[in-house]
Amino acid sequence: MRFIGSHTAILLAKKYPHYKVVVYDKLDYCSCLANLGEIARLKNFKFVKGDICSPDLVSYVMTEEKIDTVMHFAAQTHVDNSFGNSFNFTQSNIMGTHVMLEAAKCHKGIRRFIHVSTDEVYGEGETFETEAMKEEHVLEPTNPYAATKAGAEFLVKSYHRSFKLPCVITRGNNVYGPHQFPKLIPKFTNQLMRGRPVTLHGDGSNTRNFLFVEDVARAFEVILHKASPGMILNIGGDNEISNLEVAKRLIGILGLKDKEEELITFVPDRKFNDLRYTINSGKLHELGWKEEMDWEEGLQTTVEWYKKYTGRFGNIEDALVAHPRIGVAPGAGVTNTDDITG
């Protein structure tokens, strides 16, 4: 099970025992079934292995499990990979979303279809004075990943308008925390734990706004219960930090401050690397959500988790190189199908 979806499933299954939570995931390279271990034995939880690009199976599961709410987290999300083979992103993010929408349209009784998008659909915040983007801002994605997410959004909007499917779209900041397959923070953490320098793209000045994953799961809880069909909601925090500062903070947490200079290396940047993303989350705040996790505490919690549980992802060496291309070719990457109860 993937990252944000696993935390949301855990929150809902544990907090609402009268809800039946069904997780549907194909368990590709960035998924890990062990992420759902703490709810595996709950009577109101079920896991189904399947691909969102399989129309018959998706329809069967919706009918068999009497699904009334879809929270569509599944996507290819690693931007570096989208520069290596963007076809996979079109297949998963656009075709997969289309399959989910069509199945939901044909299935009787869908009360909500919550589509999880990204702040990257807005494109680059060109300067540090750029005003925070609201949900009405034009979409100007700058990389293949973000373009497929924008395309998927237009499909969601069309199903809402043409078929009255009760859809909600979310656009979130960079999320960090336990359960994440190595991207920036877990990647740097694992590089450092192996005695290697971090690999910063460009000069490390690009910023991202980091939001702790449990705060994001609570956001989806609020959206599930309070958002109205047709709404688009930004999910953003207040921790805009440069990649270089993230690296330095992780070096400090791991007690390596005296070696900071030798543990930071700069590598060629991506084909295009957005300077920053800045979003206004006022609409979501009005529904009652707010960010709770402090940046320092969240980062410390995350590092401690990876010290204990990095092994559950199997061999992640391919993810720790400067420009990973995991899962973009047949046989590439790893599969994480450890026992869910392990």
Image (tube, rainbow, N blue to C red):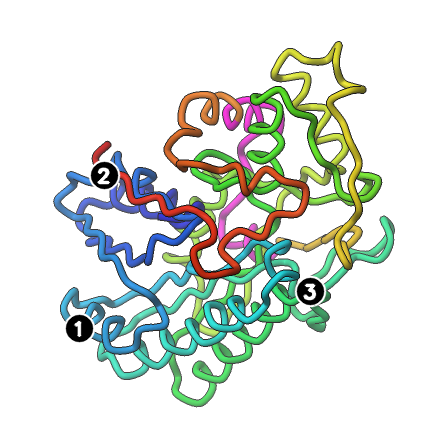
Q: Where is residue 118 in the image (x, y as percent from the top left)?
A: 58, 59
Sequence-first tag of 3 and 2: 3
Question: Quick check: 281 above or below 248?
Answer: below
Q: Position of residue 323 (x, y in %)?
A: 66, 47
38 relative position to 296: left or right: left
126 inside magenta stretch: no
Number of residues whose C-alpha sits closer than 10 Å to that of mark 3, classed few (under 14), some (14–19) or many (20 or more): many
Sequence-first tag of 1 and 3: 1
Q: Which residue is drawn at 25% across and 67% down?
A: 68
- Indicate the secondary structure of the residue bearing disc 2: loop
Number of residues whose C-alpha sits closer than 10 Å to that of mark 2, classed few (under 14), some (14–19) or many (20 or more): few
Number of residues whose C-alpha sits closer than 10 Å to that of mark 1, classed few (under 14), some (14–19) or many (20 or more): some
Q: Label 3 vs label 2: CA separation?
A: 36 Å
Q: Nearer the viewer, mark 1 or mark 3?
A: 3
Q: Label 2 vs label 1: CA separation?
A: 26 Å
294 inside magenta stretch: yes
Which portion, as a residue range, is magenta? 282-302
Q: Name the residue under label 2.
A: 339
Q: Name the residue under label 3.
A: 143
- Indicate the secondary structure of the residue bearing disc 3: loop
Q: What type is the residue that disc 3 sits on?
A: Asn
- Indicate the secondary structure of the residue bearing disc 1: helix
Viewer-proximal residue among 169 and 259: 259
Q: Name the residue under label 1.
A: 63
